[in-house]
Amino acid sequence: MEKLLLFLDEVVDAAEYLLVVHGPRLPAALQRARTRVRRCARSADGAPPSHFFHDCRHLLPLIKTPFGFDSTALEVVAGIDLSGKAAIVTGGASGIGIETARALGAAGAAVTIAARDAAAAEKVAADVVESTGNSAVASSPLELTDRASIDGFVAAWDGPLDILVNNAGVMAIQEPTIAPDGHEMQFATNHLGHFALALGLHDALAAAGSARIVSVSSSGHLRSPVIFDDLDFDFRPYEPFLAYGQSKTANVLFAVEATRRWAGDGITANALMPGGIFTNLQRHVGGSDYIEQARERFKDAGVKFKTPEQGAATSVLLATSPQLEGIGGRYFDDCNESETLTKRGSGLGGVAAYALDPANAERLWDVSLELLG
């Protein structure tokens, strides 16, 4: 971290020297940047303090890539060689998970499709092998609400892990449902299960040297922050989409804090919104009636739907793009970094400030450790 701070300080010095002649206001701006960089000192646990990435993010422009709304996962990964790299895709037996696994496999990665439906995962793995010609694609059962299943999956993993795509999830379960661990089902599945999985795979990720975690969130996170005092709806009426939103905010906060804690181990994490896609994720919501109503809402808001191939593009970008090497703690949609919102709009883009807040991220990590026991 000290070397990073010295490097950033030198960058500011060089920029000040080169740009001072271009305007009297530039040196002051650079001095403010220097002050913020110098504030980023090492914390007691060896990780940079929670404000480090939050502060330094604002010194840089949003990340823009050559890809966008219409890009597909295979287009994003074209020309990228993942031979010798290992990847896990949770929820890889349906929806965008299939296309994420297919693109990673097409690029040469050894891909493990992890899903609770073992038969479906095995079938998808065989299809990906056939379509890509990559025989190093396999499946493994994984139930994210079952600690024994997670622990067994972790214990069976052998060797370094380069890419972990936390893609599995449930959406808007209509009735309040408690997972076996005693917590609300959407929070337990979408966040706690993936949190436990990442913790268990930390050493494998660190062994890869430059590993990436991809946390599939949603614009649904704009519906709710994490309500730390009532995670399980014990004191408020259960509302399916608020519960979903809370879990999706947790997915973003995980990426922020995982990067802060683990970047020194060569592990970074980013979160994303895949787009408006109708997949098996909506199985709890209301069938064809819900889909038609959603189509009308999206149309009124000027939002277009994506295919699963397009929906997987941002996940694959975060997992593979050389442009994102060493970058973490950010949120993307349509293959580009999202603007931070202070107010929810009518579209699907943007990320809530509370989802990137370093204090929220640190608190969620600590609370999650307590919940896992």
Image: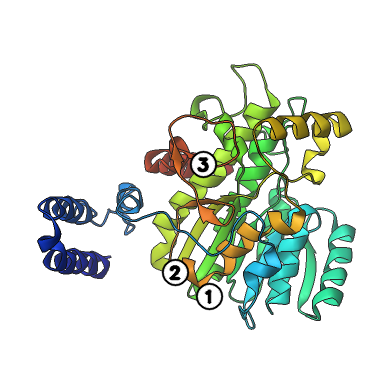
The answer to which image quadrant residue 173 occupies is top right
Closer to the chain start, of discs 3 and 1, is 1
Query: Between marks 3 and 1, how big is the CA–CA gap?
Result: 31 Å
Which residue type carries mark 1?
Ala
**Image location of residue 156, percent across then percent down:** 70, 68
Residue hosting label 3: 350
Quarter where residue 235 is shown: top right
Q: Real-space Cα distance between discs 2 and 3?
A: 27 Å
- Residue in the image at 83% along x and 38% along y: 283
Mark closer to the chain start, 2 or 3: 2
- Mark 3 secondary-structure assignment: loop
Tag 2 secondary structure = loop
- The image position of residue 299, as x and y in percent, is 71, 34
Question: In the picture, residue 248 is in which quadrant?
Answer: top right
- Is residue 98 among what the camera can see? yes
Mark pair 2, 1: CA separation: 8 Å
Q: Position of residue 191 (x, y in %)?
A: 61, 44
Classify mark 2: residues with Cα within 10 Å, few (<14), some (14-19) or many (20+): some
Residue name at image x 87 percent, y 71 percent: 126
Screen quadrant of the C terminus: top right
* In-front residue for pair 286/294: 294
Bin the neighbour count of mark 3 within 10 Å (Cα to Cα): few under 14, some 14-19, many 20 and up. many
Q: Nearer the viewer, mark 3 or mark 1?
A: 3
Q: From this viewpoint, is residue 142 visible?
A: no
Q: Would residue 82 appear left or right of 131 to someone viewing this image?
A: left
Q: Which mark is residue 208?
A: 1
Q: Residue at x 67, y 57 (%)?
A: 70
Between circles 2 and 3, the one closer to the viewer is: 3
Q: Amino acid at mark 2?
A: Gly
Q: Which residue is mark 2?
A: 266
45 above or below 157? above
